[in-house]
């Protein structure tokens, strides 16, 4: 099972979104920094505190939120840990650069170990401020 490291391209992964569309990551997120989170499920209080499909409407989220991914398929592509019984993905997070490459990967084998929004915002701010200017 691969582990995605900084600089690795994020694998093509098609997910169903809460508005019943399908998107392919990282293509659908290209052009800007992106965060991809896999979480255990709506039954997990730690995951609910972070993000669930039920919270999309409540918080007026404007970014794609997927659900129902095949745990084994996602794990094979990303190296995410899978709980064997019941089967679900352990929390896994990635920050992607505008080209779809991994900047940071965070793998959890239990109910702790998450990307923290404030840390992600700070990282993206730092990367934007310290990136080489584009040449014409």
Image (cartoon, rainbow, N blue to C red):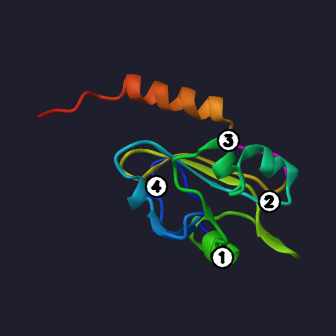
Q: Earlier in the sequence, mark 2 or mark 1?
A: 2
Q: The C terminus is located in which quarter?
A: top left
- Secondary structure at badge 1 equals loop
Foreground residue among 120 and 130: 120
- Name the residue tied to disc 3: 115
Horizontal side of 66 relative to 109 (left or right) equals left
- Name the residue tied to disc 1: 70
Q: CA distance from mark 3 to mark 4?
A: 18 Å
Residue 14 drawn at (x, y percent): 50, 71
Residue 68 drawn at (x, y percent): 67, 72
Q: CA distance from mark 2 to mark 4?
A: 29 Å
- Secondary structure at badge 2 equals loop
What label sits on residue 42 in the rendered view?
Answer: 2
What residue appears at the point 88 percent right and 76 percent down from the top-left corner?
A: 85
- Name the residue tied to disc 4: 8
112 in magenta: yes
- Secondary structure at badge 3 equals loop
Q: Residues within 10 Å of mark 1 (few under 14, many from 20)?
A: few
- Which region shows up in magenta? 111-115
């Amino acid at each position: 099972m691969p582990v995605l490291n900084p600089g690795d391209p994020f694998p093509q992964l098609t997910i169903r979104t809460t508005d019943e569309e399908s998107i392919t990551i990282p293509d659908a997120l290209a052009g800007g920094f992106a965060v991809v989170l896999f979480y255990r499920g709506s039954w997990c209080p730690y995951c609910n505190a972070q993000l669930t499909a039920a919270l999309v409407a409540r918080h007026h989220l404007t970014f794609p939120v997927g659900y129902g991914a095949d745990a084994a398929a996602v794990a094979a592509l990303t190296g995410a840990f899978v709980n064997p019984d019941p089967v679900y993905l352990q929390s896994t997070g990635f920050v992607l650069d505008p080209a779809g490459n991994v900047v940071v990967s965070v793998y959890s084998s239990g109910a702790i170990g998450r990307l923290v929004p404030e840390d992600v915002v700070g990282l993206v701010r730092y990367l934007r401020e310290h990136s080489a200017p584009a040449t014409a």
